[in-house]
Every structure is written in structure tokens, then in C-alpha cells.
Amino acid sequence: MRITQLAQWVAAIPALLVALTISDQAMAASELNSGDTAWILTATALVLFMTLPGLALFYGGLVRARNVLSVLMHCFAVACLASVAWLLVVYSLAFGDGGAYQPYIGGLGKAFLSGVGPDSMFGTIPESVFFMFQMTFAIITPALIVGAFPERIRFSGVLLFSLLWLVLVYAPAAHWVWGGGWLAEMGVMDFAGGIVVHTTAGISALVLVLVLGPRRGFPKEIRPPHNPGMTVAGACMLWVGWFGFNAGSALAADGSAGMAMLVTHISAAVASLAWAAIEWAKFGKPSVIGIVTGAIAGLASITPASGFVGPLGAVVIGLSAGVICQWFTSWIKLRLKIDDSLDVFAVHGVGGILGTLLAAFFAAKSLGGLGLPEGVTMSDQFVVQLIGVASVAIFSGVVTWIIAKVVAITVGLRVSEEEEIDGLDISGHGERGYDLT
Amino acid sequence: MKMIVAILQPHRLETVREALASVGVHGMTASEAQGYGRQGGHKEIYRGAEYEIHFVPKVKIEVAVSDNDEDRAVEAIQTAAQTGRIGDGKIFVMDLSRAVRIRTGEVGEEAL
């Protein structure tokens, strides 16, 4: 009897082995896609390059010479801090399972990447790759806010603000839109971060400077950009890196990624030309700072729409970015007299909002897009987009105001007047950007 | 001997150097400078905002010449540096009491 059983088992072994092999192959085919994985690995590097050094140089050239190092330092330090925070809790809060609170925030189940190993998958790519790709977004978003407060903020204030902001603003917003939260359930379309990245950063920039106050002498005695060439170099790196940002957000190496890259490029080109043309007509000269600012506005604006719209959408979104973002730079600074120093709200906030709203129309097949979901009309989608932008904007603004107040009364937000006059390079870091006499 | 100090538009430096060389004045010191005169600076526009630039970039040259060369040198500089627009700069001439060539120890006009 025992021998018969054994014989039956032995006879079954080859069949079992075959079954195992087949299911192994089947799983491998449906899970890890090496093309997708290779592209997202590459895109991750491109997006990190946007912050280090792209954004740092873009911003660094726009401040006066005595503050250039402090701006590079802000971008660099925020990148490091965001990476550690991402690993500790922010990734889990954004993309972990929130259980009963899933509509609002992820859980702590993936804090310090617990339970995530080399074999863990996210769609067709390893979760480690998804973690890294998304981390570069969490890096650049608080780094964008650096443009609002240069030349007067305390370094410890930058660190504490950025840390609290990532946990309390970025993690929930990313969860709502990308982590399966309530806006995702509602069907909001934000391909690469018009809401999650640009609306949060833009609104928070504006609110933070209301608490922080303007630079000494604003607006009459402010110095012009000290190194426009540095700004141009940074803007070019941002443009190239943005291919990873938008085309990478397809999370696949496919036609959607290709189209995202195409519309990203066209929008940037159109916005650059539009910005420069307006300056030419208005002031008699098209400036290089203007044309590259136009590019960044066009890139921010196409971000939420990039995987949904076609070339027509790209041209219209780029054109609106060049015109509307430019109008807002003057309106915020000259009319409202708010010293959002490097125009984070006007360029990123307005751009991100604009693209998010326009995506509702240009995603439609009739306007050359890749198509809205079955049974959803443009106006349905527009209402969802509006709810998405407005709720995240209000949430970002309120929480940023509270964080700014907390930072102001704890480590302090602003340097002394003397430190501001000396410049943050010497007073904050003991270094000089240039060996001037 | 005279010391000529001239404040120039930066883009005229090369023309002025050639003009001085053509009247037989060899040697000058040039440095980047910032300043303003009667025009009181100028305005630049970045991202639609006007910036008041009080100190305008200039080049300062210093030329030591013999008394005989003074008029020719000043005239050469003035002609070569002139664009006819505001901000062309100034020329100042001072008496020079002593000059020494460090390498040889020559003094006076020999040292120029």
C-alpha cells in the first residue's frame, strides 16, 4: 500500500515539474517586463537630474551673486532630506494601503520599505524601481518651492518646512490622486503631476511667502538675476529631464510614453516662442530669461495632460502657458506685490492648474486626444478636474500656512536683516560663490 | 609725465587700445569697473519686472604717458571711445610724479 502510494507520487513528479515551469514562465511574462523596467530606471535618472543640478542651476542664476550657493544648497539638501523621508514614511503614506482610511491617506505598512524585496512587483516593474521613480517626484516638488523664498530664509527653516510639508501635504495629495485615494476614485486625470507636483508646490510657495514676507527692499531695490547663463543651462536640463518625468509616468515603454514625450516637447517649444514673442512686442526685446521661463511654463502645463492629449492639445496648452503664466508673473509681483521671488506660483502653479483643466477637453478623441473614459463627457471630466485642483489647492494652502507658522515659532523662518544684507552664502554657509573683491 | 584714467563703455576697450597703439602709446592697465555719471544708471527688464541698475558695468583704463604724448593720447581715447550716446564715459588726466620700471630700475619717461 505504501509502495503504491510512493509510486503514484513519483509518477506525478514530472507532471508537477512541468506545471511549475509553465506557471513560472506565465508569471514572468505577465509580471516583469524588462523593456518597461529599463525605461523607468532611465526615467528615474532623468527626473533626479531635473533637480540635481537642473532646478538648482535654473534657480541659482536668478538670485543675486551673494546668494547663489544658498540656493544650490537648498535644492541639494532638500533632495537628500526628501529621499530619507520617502524611505521612512512618505512612500508608505502615499502608496501604501490605508485600510479604512484608504480614500485619504496610505498606511504605514510600507514604512522603511518593510516587506518589499527584490521580487516585489508594481505592475510590470519591480517595486524598488517604482519607489525610486516616485521618489524623484517627491524630491523635485519641495525643491520647486525653494524658488519662492530665496535670499532671506533660514536654512534650518528650509529643512523643517520641507520635511513637514512632504509628510503633511505631498503624501496625502499624492495618495489622493495616484495612490488610490478619493480623487483617483472620482476619475481625476493627472498624468505626471499637474495637481500632485505643480499645484501643491505653486500654492504652497505663495502661502509660504505671505508668512515669510518679501525680500528687503522689494519691489524697488531688488537686484536682477546675477547669471542668466546659469539659468539657461538649468532650464535646458529641466527640459530634457522632463522627458523622464512625463514619458516615465506611463510606467511603461509603450505608445502612451512616446506620445507623452512628443506632446511634452511640443508644448515646451510653443510656450517658449509665445513667451518671447510677447516680450518682444511689449518691451521691444525678447530675453533669454523670458524664452527659457516660457519653456518651463509649457513643461509644467503639459505635465498633467501629457499621457492624454495629442499634438493639437500640446500646441494649445503650450500657447496658453506662454501667455497666461507670463501674465501671472507680472500680476503677482507688480500688482499684488507678493515676493514669490522666482515666480513658482505663476510658472508652476498656474501652469499645472491650466494643464489639468485643459486636459479635460484635449483628452477627447474629437480634439486629437487619446480619449476620455467610456461615457464621460468633456464637461463631466472638467468638473472632476476642477474638484481635483481646487481641493488640493485649498488643502495645500491651509496646511502650508500652519506648517509655516510652526516653523516660524520653532526654528525660525527668516534670517536677521544683517544676514540678509551680507547674503546667505556667507552668513548661512560660510562660503562665497565668486571671488569678488 | 601724466597719468590718464579713462572710464569707457566695455565694448569700446579694443578700439581704444588700437587707437592708442596707433599714436605710439604702448602699455595700459584695464580693469572692470562699475559706476554711474549724470545718466544715473539704467533699467533692465527680467520676466516683465523693471530693475533699476545704479552701477553700470564699465571698463577703467590707466595709461601713463610723457608730457608730449598727453594730447595725442587723450584725443585718441576720446575719438575711439565715442559712440555719441549717454554713458560713453570720462577721461581724467593727472600729473605723474614718478615712474619706475621694476625689472631694470629705470626711472621717469625711460620707464614708461
Image (spheres, grey):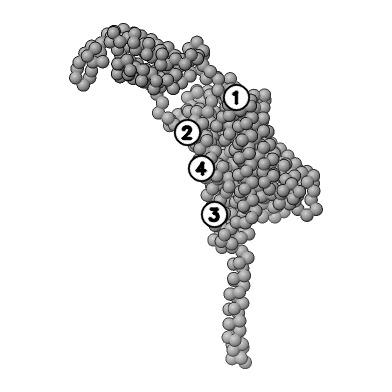
Instruction: Find the distance from the CA under tag 1 to the CA under tag 3.
Output: 45 Å
Which residue is disc 3 drawn over?
A41
Residue under the image location 69 percent in, 47 percent down? A309
Earlier-in-chain disc, 1 versus 3: 3
Earlier-in-chain disc, 2 versus 4: 4
Residue under the image location 56 percent in, 42 percent down? A239
For label 3, count other residues whose C-alpha is less than 10 Å away and answer few (under 14), some (14-19) or many (20+). some
**Front position in the image: A200 or A237:** A237
Could you say where residue A128 lies in the image, as x and y percent from the top left?
56, 56
Which residue is disc 2 drawn over?
A69
Instruction: Find the distance from the CA under tag 3 to the CA under tag 4.
Output: 17 Å
Q: Which type of secondary structure does the marked residue at label 4 adopt?
A: helix
Instruction: Find the distance from the CA under tag 4 to the CA under tag 1.
Output: 35 Å
Residue A386: name its quadrant: top right
Q: Label 4 is found on which chain of the structure? A: A
Residue under the image location 63 percent in, 65 percent down? A30
Q: Which type of secondary structure does the marked residue at label 2 adopt?
A: helix
Q: Do the residues labelled 3 and 4 touch (CB within 8 Å)?
A: no
Q: Do the residues labelled 2 and 3 touch (CB within 8 Å)?
A: no
Which residue is disc 4 drawn over?
A52
Earlier-in-chain disc, 3 versus 4: 3
Which residue is disc 1 drawn over?
A284
For label 4, count other residues whose C-alpha is less than 10 Å away and answer few (under 14), some (14-19) or many (20+). many
Q: Label 2 is found on which chain of the structure? A: A
Q: What residue type is labelled 1?
A: Gly
Q: Which amino acid does label 3 sit on?
A: Leu
Residue under the image location 65 percent in, 39 percent down? A318
Both marks 4 and 1 on one chain = yes
Instruction: Find the distance from the CA under tag 1 to the CA under tag 2.
Output: 33 Å
Q: Label 1 is found on which chain of the structure? A: A
